[in-house]
């Protein structure tokens, strides 16, 4: 859960045995003659100015140099009216870094959408087209072609998040490492003969595309995003608000098919791994194999595979020509792959597309809920095509919370759960709402807002579900709420029935024998279809039985038990699966008619509240 939403594919360079990086070692500074050869060769290949800097070894820390290079290329493209796609970065570094520049034709300041229908990532479609309007109804960002820093800035603000700090996460297509290795191999050939001693046969270590891109874009994002409080937004890799970029390219399968195929076979198409590696649930994306979320995961994994193999297996031009996929990457860098394409087609099809995902890590709201009405399940329950019960505890709690946080939804986590026909009384049951993708993460910071929620619940649905001691909690509160559940105690009040009239002696016997009693409970038959069959020892710490006046077959039973005790089964015995039971102690049939949870002993408090509950 602590992993970033986007897999940090390629962020750490692959390591060989012994810890040696398979990235070529940083050579000494090239003399002017060798530097000129490298730059000339890169220009001949059609590399953009920022990529020239990358292959000359200019560090990403020299952000000004990269911004100036991007600005020069953007100005040249603006004056000429055209810009060929760089074969090394697939156009990712070909954008104007000036945050003040905008395109009046762009819808909401965002980059034009890319039409991939039938063409596998072809040209762009107008923002006002019917297809574009249909894309807007989807819950996933469309492919776009950003060419301005303001395009990215508009994408970061597009969901309406309140931003104080942000983390930029970038996932690159797996063809990038192959093209980068191919470019280096061509540079090595070009450098041969520069020195008689062959001292400069290898260019400097290439600066990572991701690092150069961040160094260029982050200042523009910081300049355009405004925080209402500090009036300044800064980049922080650990910020809870993430601006994640997923770059895709139409030729990944032809140039790095070995990586995409392996990522599919061993990652996304494996049901067990899909849950483990998929983006966090707060993104609320579909998990079908063709969905953007699965694509995100697949692209990141494929990049890692492609990077490792590119630096280990492909270091010379000959090694590229001997491999099916690598030869295509080499041809693409040389420009040979486009011989049969028109010039206009090369300018539109060769550029990588980008999906922009702004999202915020979950916020957590804790408290204690009370359920005053029977027939209300804890979470929404659907069966046989219909809804079971009257609403749910989660629905009641999240109605106010979703609006306050401006979030996509919530997930309820609680210290155990009661059955739908059981009331939760007393001090309430501890709960934590995981609020997904909150646009207003500072909600509930004020006491007035917490009190407003409590008042809202008291009036909503006749007060069937209310909450007290509402407070913001850290993510670590999950651990506090769920650890040590076996040692917690819970108190119940039950209305019970016996098949015979009970005397005062029977009730005293129940009180005496049930107090401090250890019972052995097999998994109840009513939950056996969804829980592992096992026998669990549980302790009845205290018991008190009371007669119901005028009804000798009915009695009240107050129990304090170990968490995880099945109270209903303890009363009726569940066909002998719980032993001993109230029925076996009384020597007759017994059943439970109504059950209330009246207390959960657990330290879980908030501002001004006591430290009270947990259950299994």
Image (spheres, rainbow, N blue to C red):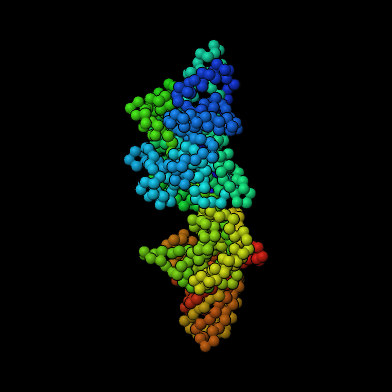
Give the farthest residue toward the bottom.
550
Residue at screen point 51% across, 28% down: 49
Is residue 387 at all visible to an observer of this figure? yes
Closest to the observer: 575 or 246? 246
Compared to residue 70, the image places residue 407 above or below, namely below
Expressed as whole percent of the image width and height from the top left, the position of residue 193 reads: 51, 13
Quadrant of the image for the C terminus? Answer: bottom right
The residue positioned 44% from the left and 50% from the top of the image is 285
Depth check: 390 or 218 in front?
218
Residue 333 x, y percent position in the rendering: 43, 26
Q: Position of residue 409 (x, y in %)?
A: 49, 57
Asked if one can make out residue 535 in the rendered structure from this viewpoint, the answer is no
Residue 118, horizontal then vertical, whole percent = 33, 40
The residue lying at 54 percent from left, 13 percent from top is: 195
Q: Residue at x 51, y 18 (%)?
A: 37
Q: Nearer the viewer, residue 583 or 267?
A: 267
Depth order, front residue of 418/504: 418
Q: As displayed, is residue 453 above or below residue 322?
A: below
- Decide: is 518 above or below 175: below
Q: Give the total of numbered labels.
A: 0
């Amino acid at each position: 859960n602590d992993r970033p939403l986007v897999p940090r594919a390629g962020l750490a360079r692959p390591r060989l045995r012994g810890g040696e990086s398979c990235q070529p070692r940083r050579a000494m500074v090239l003399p002017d003659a060798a530097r000129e050869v490298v730059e000339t060769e890169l220009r001949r290949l059609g590399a953009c100015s920022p990529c020239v800097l990358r292959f000359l070894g200019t560090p990403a820390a020299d952000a000004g140099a990269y911004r100036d290079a991007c600005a020069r290329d953007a100005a040249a493209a603006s004056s000429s009216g055209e810009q060929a796609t760089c074969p090394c970065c697939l156009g990712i570094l070909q954008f104007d870094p000036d945050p003040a520049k905008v395109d009046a034709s762009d819808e909401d300041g965002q980059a034009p959408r890319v039409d991939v229908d039938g063409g596998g990532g072809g040209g762009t479609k107008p923002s006002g087209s019917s297809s574009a309007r249909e894309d807007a109804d989807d819950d996933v960002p469309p492919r776009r072609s950003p060419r301005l820093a303001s395009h990215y800035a508009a994408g970061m603000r597009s969901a309406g998040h309140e931003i104080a700090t942000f983390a930029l996460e970038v996932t690159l297509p797996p063809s990038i490492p192959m093209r980068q290795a191919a470019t280096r191999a061509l540079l090595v050939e070009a450098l041969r003969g520069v020195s008689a001693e062959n001292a400069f046969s290898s260019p400097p270590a290439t600066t990572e595309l991701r690092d150069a891109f961040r160094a260029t874009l982050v200042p523009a994002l910081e300049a355009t995003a405004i925080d209402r409080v500090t009036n300044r937004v800064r980049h922080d890799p650990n910020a809870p608000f993430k601006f994640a970029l997923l770059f895709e390219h139409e030729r990944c399968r032809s140039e790095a098919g070995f990586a995409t195929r392996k990522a599919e076979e061993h990652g996304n198409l494996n049901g067990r791994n899909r849950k483990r590696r998929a983006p966090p649930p707060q993104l609320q994306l579909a998990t079908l194999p063709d969905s953007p979320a699965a694509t995100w995961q697949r692209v990141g994994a494929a990049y890692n595979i492609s990077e490792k193999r590119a630096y280990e297996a492909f270091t010379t031009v000959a090694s590229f020509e001997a491999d099916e996929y690598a030869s295509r990457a080499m041809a693409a860098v040389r420009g040979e792959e486009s011989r049969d394409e028109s010039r206009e087609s090369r300018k539109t099809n060769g550029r990588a597309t980008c999906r922009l995902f702004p999202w915020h890590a979950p916020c957590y709201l804790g408290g204690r809920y009370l359920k005053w009405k029977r027939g209300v399940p804890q979470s929404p329950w659907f069966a046989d095509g219909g809804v079971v019960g009257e609403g749910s505890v989660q629905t009641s709690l999240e109605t106010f919370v979703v609006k306050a946080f401006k979030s996509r939804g919530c997930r309820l986590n609680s210290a155990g759960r009661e059955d739908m026909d059981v009331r939760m009384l007393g001090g309430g049951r501890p709960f934590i709402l995981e609020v997904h993708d909150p646009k207003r993460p500072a909600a509930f910071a004020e006491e007035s807002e917490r009190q407003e929620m409590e008042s809202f619940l008291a009036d909503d649905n006749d007060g069937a579900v209310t909450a007290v001691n509402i407070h913001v909690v850290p993510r670590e509160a999950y651990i506090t709420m769920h650890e040590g559940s076996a040692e917690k105690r819970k108190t119940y009040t039950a209305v019970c029935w016996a098949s015979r009239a009970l005397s005062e002696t029977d009730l005293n016997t129940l009180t005496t024998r049930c107090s401090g009693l250890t019972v052995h409970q097999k998994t109840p038959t009513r939950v056996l279809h969804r829980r592992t069959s096992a026998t669990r020892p549980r302790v009845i710490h205290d018991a008190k039985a009371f007669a119901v006046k005028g009804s000798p077959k009915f009695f009240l039973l107050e129990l304090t038990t170990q968490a995880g005790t099945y109270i209903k089964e303890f009363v009726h015995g569940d066909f002998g699966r719980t032993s001993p039971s109230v029925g076996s102690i009384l020597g007759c049939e017994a059943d439970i008619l109504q059950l209330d949870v009246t207390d959960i002993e657990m330290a879980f408090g908030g501002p001004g509240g006591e430290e009270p509950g947990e259950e299994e």
